[in-house]
Amino acid sequence: MPARPLAAALAEGTVVLDGGLSNQLEAQGCDLSDALWSARLLADGPGQIEAAHTAYVRAGAQVLITASYQASFEGFARRGIGREAAAGLFARSVELARRAAGTVGRDVWVAASVGPYGAVAADGAEYRGRYGLTVRELERFHRPRIEALAAAGPDALALETVPDLDEARALLRVAGEYGLPVWLSYTVAGGRTRAGQPLDEAFGLARGRDEVIAVGVNCCDPAEADTAVRAAVRATGKPAVVYPNSGEHWDADAGAWTGGATFDPARAVGWQEAGARLIGGCCRVGPAAIAGLAGVRRGGPPV
């Protein structure tokens, strides 16, 4: 276990997150063509998940995000996995990251991923939001997932790739019941949430919530990150979290990535200057890029 809380580390400087788990698993030869995506390997290939986490730790990551992004009790049930066994798989996601964290002689924190309802639907809805569900319905969906993850003892909860305000409200309400630090991270496009809401309003939901240690964006184009970091800090007074995609774009209809990569670790200097204290990468950002971020973090201006 780390010697100090993650929030204390953020108060002292920038902390480097890992990169995309799915792309590293695919690089290891894993087939992720399943509605559970990487969460399938919690049951079928836990060693692959641990190896992927370990690759990021060795690249310099200081926070590992668990393989629970697309995990749900409903999704596991469709594969014939009962409730008790499914809770064990949520716990396993934390255990695997913790085991990888222990392979280096420095503090490495584990953040339990709580992905959006749209990710579990596995139809690209996390890039649209507006599911037609009420905040209370979203709370009922997320509560068992968060409860199972919190029971496993992560250092933080990563409420990530959130597409709209209603889901953010639900996630914050439920996560606040468990006494863990959390970060809130939206997926954005065109300077707004994926559902089209203003970022100041979206980030402002975290204002005054002591459990929220950082607010920001992930799973977006790197070009969106600069403005979003400033907006997050302005709206909340909290450190920002930022971990964009490679710059390629996901075509949900075609089920493929298009375009070229634009992720550049040198951007992290500007993110730090704007108030980002958790920096990393999301989809298609691998260990080499995280090693680059770790180098920028070490060699950048004081933070």
Image: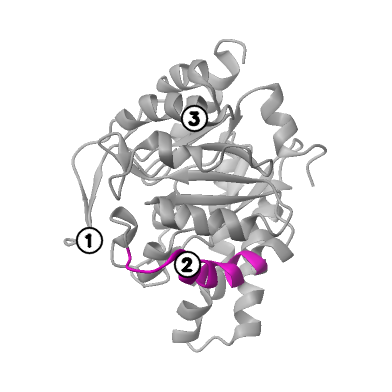
Q: CA distance from mark 2 to mark 1?
A: 26 Å
Closer to the observer: label 2 or label 1?
Answer: 2
Query: Closer to the observer: label 1 or label 3?
Result: 3
> Which of the pair 118/202 is nearer the observer?
202
Distance between the alpha carbons at the discs numbered 1 and 3? 35 Å
Q: Is the residue 244 above or below the residue 40 in the image?
A: above
Circles 2 and 3, Cβ within 8 Å, touching? The answer is no
Q: Which residues are magenta?
A: 131-147
Gap in Å between the C-alphas at discs 2 and 3?
A: 24 Å
Is any part of residue 89 visible from this angle?
yes
Most extreme residue toward the right is 3
Q: Residues within 10 Å of mark 1 (few under 14, many from 20)?
A: few
Residue 216 visible somewhere in the drawing: no
Reply yes or no: does residue 145 show up in magenta.
yes
**In what element is the residue under mark 1?**
loop
Residue corresponding to mark 1: 255
Amino acid on which the number 3 mark rests in the picture: Ala
Of the pair 32 and 235, the residue shown nearer to us: 235
**Residue corresponding to mark 3:** 235
**To which quarter of the image does residue 265 belong?**
top left
